[in-house]
Each structure stands twice: as structure tokens, then as C-alpha cells.
Image (cartoon, rainbow, N blue to C red):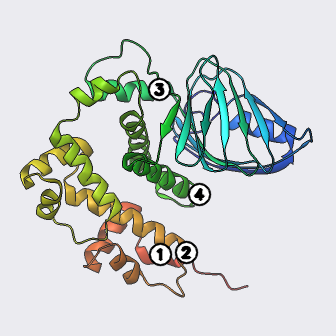
Amino acid sequence: MSDRSSAGKLGRVAPNRVIETTDVDHAEAALSEAYLPLRLRPRAGGHSVGMHLDAARIDRVTVGCLLFGSDIRIMTEEATNYHIDIPLSGHSRSRAGKRDEVFTSPGSAAVFMPGAPADLHWTRDTVELCLMVDPVIVERELANLLGHELKTPVRFAETMDVSTPGGRSWMRTIDLVVRESAREPGVLRYPLIARRLEQILIDGLLVEHRHNYSDELSADRFTPRDRAVRRAVELLEGRPEDSWTTRDLAAEVGLSARSLQSGFCDLTGAPPMTYLRGVRLRRTHGDLVDSNAEHTTVSQVAHLWGFTHLGRFAAAYRHEYGELPSDTLGASAPRSS
């Protein structure tokens, strides 16, 4: 989704754009189409960039992994979306408009506001996750969290710490989106799952990164029960294979079972054990898609993710994905030549 293209142009979930090129003009055209108009200048004065781009879009969020094989300068036109660049390796320095220059490396991210061009310098073999988010959904989600319309646009701090527990949790969501967008078929083809992941990405950005509404958001929205419920969600996402019960989960986060049930439904729209089943189904589906039927069985994968009753698991799987788990695993079997 180009920064200046209309949202929804390609549908809710667009397929991955995987591009490898050494040509500067080709690289500029690909990045301009995926993100926003820009120019590339290899720092050594050459004409080769060694670019690898793997980008996908969920509605109004674009997530991509970008690599250059040489030191490079990137000069963008004025942005109309939020952009978040997260180094996985290497180092970068950047400046957006008249804001201060920022330096980022693994564990930190640069955040760019709409309304200004950016000037970026990446070291050789820097790998970055590049997110682009439509301001409309950011402001709509923040208004929902606060319970009132925003008086001014959201203004994020220039850098984000993604090494904190909350930052690492947010990064795991990004990783899930990246992995699922590369799978065919993947869970992102289901609109409900795509919308939920998009919402989690936006909520994580709003909660974990500093902006001009952070104090109000922290004071007004997140009561001790809210924080405990969010911790419960993180536990189920991080350890879905454990033998959770509602009572055990409630004790882990310091709530009564009744309070956890109510809070979980308010936050996720489902009771804890229903939410857990959805997490387990997603993880099982992903493993079945990636596994070889000659070396893996459905029961092995199901048990790995905490399913103990194979009949109920198969029924739930078929209801969610429209096929039996054995069909998913069988589709990954190698074909004889």
C-alpha cells in the first residue's frame, strides 16, 4: 500500500511483495509503491543497492522487512502515514522534517510522523522491519480507548524502546504478522483474525510508546483489573501449550475467576478458555502448514499445543479453517516427480 494510495485498494489482506534487485531505479519504484515516494543514494557513489524487500499489508497497516547490501541514504517525500523503522541488525540515523536526529540499533525504533519528509542513513547489511500505519485507524483506536474524540492529532516520540517486556510482546505480534503473511494459505485470509491482529498492533503501539495522550490513556483506561487481564492475555499468547484453567490463570494474575472472565470478555470479546483455544488453533495450523506429512502426525502437533482430546480438536479445527487438520498436513506432503 503506497503512502498516497487509497486504503482498501487491494482488499483487506494483500499478498506479499517480495522483490530483490541491485538496480537503484527498480528499488526506488518498489519502495515507492509499497511505502511512499523516495530516492536512494548508495553511500559509496555506486549504482548497486542489493535490496531485498518482503512486504505485506493488512487493511491499513503495511509490514515489511527491508535489507540493503551497502551503506545507503534514503530521502523520502512528505509522509501522510505513521512510519516505524525497527532495526533487527545494523545501525541507522534519521531525521524527519525539523525534528531531532535519532540513532537506532536493535532494541530501538525510529518513529516518523505524517506531514514531513525524512532523511535516513543505513549502514551496510542493516535489516529493518518497516511499518506504515494509517493515522485514521490510530486515532480511531485511541478515541475508543479513551472514550472520547481526540482534540489534536497523535504525536509520538521520535524513538521507541522495543527491548522492554511490553516492547518485546509487541514485536512478537509483528513477527506473527510477518510469518503468517508469508504462508499460503495463512490465517490472515480470515478477516476476523486479520482485524484482531491489526488491532493488537495498534493497541501495542499506543500503550507501549510515548505520545501526547499517554498520561491520559494510562490514568483513565487501564485500571488494575485491566492490566491484570492484559497480563493474562500475554500469558496465553506466550504459553498456550500449558494446561491452563480459568482458575489457574486468575490466580497467576491476582484476580478472582469471575473478575477475569468479565474482564477477558470486555477486552477480547471471548472468555479466557475460548481465547486460548483460538491461540492453540492458530499455532497448530501454522505448524501443520509448515510440517511434512511423512515425518509429522496431526496428533503430535495437536498435543504439542495443548490439545488432549483429538476428536474435539478436529471438530474445532474444521469449524475454524473449513478442513480437517489431516487435510492441511497432507497438502504439505512432497509431491512425487
Question: Toward the viewer: 105 or 174?
Answer: 105
Residue 62 sits above or below residue 117 on the image: below
Please, what is the three-letter code of the amino acid marked with disc 3?
Phe
- The answer to whether residue 172 of the structure is visible from this angle is yes
**Element type at mark 4:** loop
Q: Earlier in the sequence, mark 2 or mark 3?
A: 3
Q: Earlier in the sequence, mark 3 or mark 4?
A: 3
Q: Earlier in the sequence, mark 2 or mark 4?
A: 4
Give the label on residue 327, or none: 1
Can you identify the residue that label 4 sits on? 182
How far across and how far down the image is residue 330, in percent? Answer: 52, 79
Please, what is the three-letter code of the amino acid marked with disc 1?
Asp
Looking at the image, is mark 3 or mark 1 nearer the viewer?
3
- C-alpha distance separating marks 2 and 4: 16 Å
Please, what is the three-letter code of the amino acid marked with disc 2?
Ala
Q: Quadrant of residue 222?
A: top left
- C-alpha distance separating marks 3 and 4: 30 Å
- The answer to whether residue 322 of the structure is visible from this angle is no
Horizontal placement of 11 versus 283: left or right? right
Marks 1 and 2 close (CB-CB < 8 Å) = yes
